[in-house]
């Protein structure tokens, strides 16, 4: 697992076993005791970083279980605020809508050993609760960065990309957390319930194609890299 630490930009990366869903912990460049956490998952490896924090703003790229499964665990470790779109906030309260109840489907193509490992940790009745809700898109400041959340449907109807930009010298100027709207080494899945290939092609594909070529991409699965290394369907 490779973290991203360059100059004053620090993003720590953690992976869910087997499914390789990614959690990102980005420290505030102006206040290192505060962080932005994207798609929390349970990770003992992350505790050493969480212990250095006093507060975190948490964001989901979408409502699927493997991208929200660490939220309740995270609340036990750290004072945090989950900022969630209205559509996503409703789904995470229902294990059938956040797909926790169908987690076994996610691992059907895995080995018996991998399936057993996952099922030992999956919570099929998992739910969590948003602290603050916005309609569909929002902007706010995080340290020297401006955070812009954009609705990017296709993989799910509540998928969103989280874009950070700054002109501050010494910081990575553009960062994009894409969730499953853009993943490294895999095609985009739009066939799940709440997904839409039509919406992906009409809305999300043009959005991603317009992103600057030197944007740092932090995907929902697979290692981070530059946009030019990723396939946009």
Image (spheres, helix red, strand yellow):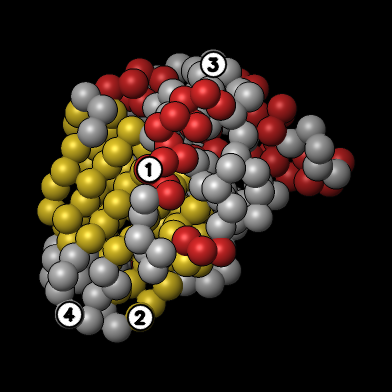
Kind of element beneath mark 3: loop
Residue indicated by mark 4:
169
Mark toward the viewer: 1 or 3: 1
Give me the C-alpha separation between circle 1 and circle 3.
Answer: 29 Å
The mark nearer the N terminus, 1 or 4, is: 4
Give me the C-alpha separation between circle 4 and circle 3.
Answer: 45 Å
Residue indicated by mark 1:
207
| Residue displayed at 41% across by 64% down | 213
Residue 17 horizontal side relative to residue 25, left or right: right
Residue indicated by mark 2:
6
Residue indicated by mark 3:
96
Mark toward the viewer: 4 or 3: 4
Vertical comparison of 231 with 86: above or below: below
| Residue displayed at 41% across by 41% down | 206
| x and y, in percent, of residue 119 in the image | 70, 35
Q: Residue furthest right?
A: 112
Residue 73 visible here: no
Residue 177 horizontal side relative to residue 117, left or right: left
| x and y, in percent, of residue 203 in the image | 40, 32
């Amino acid at each position: 697992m490779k973290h991203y630490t360059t100059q004053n930009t620090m993003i720590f990366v953690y992976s869910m076993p087997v499914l390789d869903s990614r959690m990102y912990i980005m420290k505030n460049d102006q206040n290192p005791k505060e962080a932005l956490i994207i798609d929390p998952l349970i990770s003992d490896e992350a505790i050493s970083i969480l212990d250095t924090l006093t507060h975190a703003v948490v964001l989901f790229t979408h409502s699927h279980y493997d991208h929200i499964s660490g939220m309740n665990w995270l609340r036990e470790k750290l004072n945090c605020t989950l900022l969630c779109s209205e559509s996503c906030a409703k789904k995470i309260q229902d294990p059938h809508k956040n797909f926790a109840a169908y987690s076994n489907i996610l691992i059907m193509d895995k080995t018996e050993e991998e399936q057993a490992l996952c099922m030992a940790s999956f919570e099929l009745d998992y739910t969590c609760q948003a602290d603050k809700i916005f309609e569909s898109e929002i902007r706010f400041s995080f340290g020297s960065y401006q955070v812009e959340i954009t609705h990017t449907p296709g993989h799910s109807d509540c998928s969103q990309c989280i874009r950070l930009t700054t002109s501050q010298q010494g910081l990575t100027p553009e960062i994009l957390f894409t969730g499953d709207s853009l993943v490294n080494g895999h095609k985009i899945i739009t066939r799940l319930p709440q997904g839409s290939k039509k919406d992906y092609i009409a809305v999300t594909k043009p959005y991603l194609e317009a992103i600057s070529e030197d944007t740092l991409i932090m995907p929902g699965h697979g290692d981070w890299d530059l946009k030019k290394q990723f396939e946009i369907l």
